[in-house]
Image: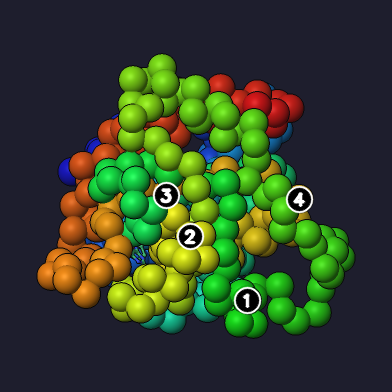
């Protein structure tokens, strides 16, 4: 049954002129896996990648095991990718053992395959008072907290083939893609749910304490999560164009009077609730991009 769903989904993405997809998959035990599904239309030279990070795996409505997938789709590209990942980390990238060089490794593989645009999605908690649960925040900038503290995927010898030793981090989130996303949301009639703001990555896996939440709020953070910045950093370092969005799955508790507390189940629930909307937005965004020139 999973297999059928998977095939249906693939044809849906293919119709939308998408030529590569990288999804986060949760096995029934809820063990997260990052899994690439790739295919290429021979008439096109560029790959497009969507990268759905753990909590937003429902973007693609996929819940099946890696084994099942590998059996079902045996293209050369898929083999190449799984092999590449095997070497690096045995196919799985889990929150528990994730280190920044592991989670960003696939971004470099994408680059070597000719991928020019990276789209990242994540689930995040809001600090901005005007945001609501279920909002979509188009990311205009980020604060990479682990990076500021030295946990940076670019640590170690620099390979100049990918990018410079000291890369700039201004203007990383592509303006034209951001504008396009806003236009699409307007056409979809969902502008009221769309925000633009600053994402902050923290190390996790715990959610923030109230004091930490207040601290981040004062720094100008609109939404906080546990991913995205390292992948974006590596993509930007090697000259890829980046688009990112956060689904606001919860409001971060900032008051000692507040008895609410966040939990992962609630995060997944909101992700599910918004999966259709996100699918439409991402699909439309990809189909509007000029794939051959990779321009918006
Ligand atoms: O992987 P992302 O950043 O999308 O997911 C967030 C961070 C944690 O993995 C999880 C917490 O509920 O959601």
Q: Is mark 3 within 8 Å of ligand 1?
A: no
Which of discs 1 and 2 lies nearer the camera? The answer is: 2
Q: Is residue 266 above or below residue 114?
A: below
Q: Residue at x 49, y 22 (%)?
A: 183
First in sequence: mark 4 vs mark 1: 1
Instruction: Find out whether the residues at labels 3 and 4 contact each other: C-beta distance under 8 Å.
Output: no
| Mark 4, secondary structure of its residue | loop
First in sequence: mark 3 vs mark 4: 4
Marks 2/4: CA–CA distance? 25 Å
First in sequence: mark 1 vs mark 2: 1
Q: Quadrant of ligand 1?
A: bottom left
Residue highlighted by disc 4: 239
Question: Can the viewer see residue 194 in this picture?
Answer: yes
Residue highlighted by disc 2: 221
| Mark 2, secondary structure of its residue | loop
Q: Which mark is residue 148?
A: 1
Q: Which mark is residue 246?
A: 3
First in sequence: mark 1 vs mark 3: 1
Marks 1/2: CA–CA distance? 15 Å
Q: Is residue 292 above or below residue 6?
A: above
Marks 4/1: CA–CA distance? 21 Å
Q: Is residue 45 above or below residue 135?
A: above
């Amino acid at each position: 049954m999973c297999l059928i769903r998977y095939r249906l989904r693939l044809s849906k993405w293919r119709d939308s002129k998408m030529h590569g997809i990288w999804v986060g998959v949760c096995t029934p035990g809820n063990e997260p896996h990052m899994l690439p599904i790739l295919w290429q239309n021979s008439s096109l030279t560029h790959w497009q990648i969507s990268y759905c990070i753990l909590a937003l795996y429902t973007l693609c409505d996929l819940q099946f095991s890696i084994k099942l997938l590998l059996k079902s789709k045996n293209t050369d590209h898929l083999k190449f990718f799984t092999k590449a990942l095997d070497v690096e980390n045995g196919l799985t990238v889990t929150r528990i053992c994730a280190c920044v060089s592991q989670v960003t490794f696939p971004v470099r593989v994408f680059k070597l395959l000719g991928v020019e645009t990276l789209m990242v999605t994540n689930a995040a908690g809001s600090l901005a008072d005007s945001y609501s649960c279920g909002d979509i925040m188009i990311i205009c900038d980020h604060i990479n907290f682990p990076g500021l503290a030295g946990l940076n995927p670019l640590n170690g010898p620099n390979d100049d083939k990918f990018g410079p030793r000291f890369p700039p981090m201004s203007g990383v989130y592509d303006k034209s893609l951001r504008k396009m996303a806003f236009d699409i949301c307007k056409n979809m009639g969902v502008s009221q749910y769309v925000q633009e703001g600053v994402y902050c990555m923290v190390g996790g896996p715990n959610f923030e304490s109230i004091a930490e939440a207040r601290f981040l709020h004062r720094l100008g953070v609109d939404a906080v999560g546990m991913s995205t910045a390292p992948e974006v950093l590596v993509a930007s370092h090697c000259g890829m164009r980046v688009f990112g969005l956060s689904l606001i799955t919860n409001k971060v508790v900032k008051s000692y009077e507040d008895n609410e507390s966040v939990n992962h189940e609630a995060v997944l629930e909101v992700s599910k609730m918004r999966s259709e909307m996100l699918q439409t937005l991402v699909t439309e965004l990809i189909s509007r991009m000029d794939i051959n020139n990779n321009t918006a």
